[in-house]
Amino acid sequence: MSELVAGEWYPLQTLLDMLKGVARASGDHTLLAIGKAIVDHAVQPVMPPTMVEALQMVDVAYHMNHRLDGEVMFDPATGVMREGIGHYRCYPEKHQIIMVCDSPYPSELDRGILLGTARRAASRGVRPRVDVVLDESRPSRKRGADSCTYRVTW
């Protein structure tokens, strides 16, 4: 595929292959930048007022921007979410939020999505400094696991 058209839908494998090529050519920092930019360009639900709520909505936004058998995977009118592409799960803890992501995307792209979302949520609050770190003590797609775990602090 040589040319993408805005607004069109493409097979997920096409995107995954392109991201793999980007990582080979430009490195993980480019995947991180793409992930942060996704937050500004993808279909998003209304940004909730708190950091926890914003990160809980990442899974909804993820499903709103993917199709399965031609149907969008989250319907905001009905609240129905279709399974089949993994999730972004949010676990609030004291002074941080744990995010477990089992999407098929590269780890740094996921980290960028979480960082972009968290920064957007924090910019409305008192403390805009946000950090999203891959938890190396837990399973990681970088080491062959099916998911990655991130620690979000602000």
Image (cartoon, rainbow, N blue to C red):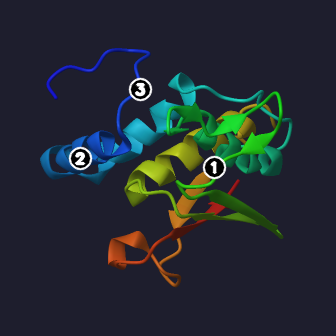
Q: Residue furthest front?
A: 69
Q: What percent of the width, then of the height, locates residue 41?
A: 51, 23
The secondary structure type at the circle numbered 1 is loop
Residue at image location 50% in from the left, 57% down from the top: 103
* Disc 1 and disc 2 in contact, CB within 8 angstroms: no
According to the picture, the residue beneath numbered tag 1 turns out to be: 130
Location of residue 81 with respect to 104 vertically, above or below = above
Where 84 sits versus 143, above or below?
above
What's the amino acid at mark 3?
A: Trp
Label 1 to label 3: alpha-carbon separation: 32 Å
Between 20 and 7, the residue placed more toward the observer is: 7
Tell whether 120 sits left or right of 111: right
Quick one: label 2, few (<14), some, or many (20+) residues within 10 Å? few
Q: Earlier in the sequence, mark 1 or mark 2?
A: 2
Left or right of residue 2, residue 119 in this image: right
Give the residue type at disc 2. Answer: Asp
- Tag 2 residue: 17
Q: Position of residue 148 (x, y in %)?
A: 50, 69
- Mark 3, residue position: 9
Q: Secondary structure at mark 2?
A: helix
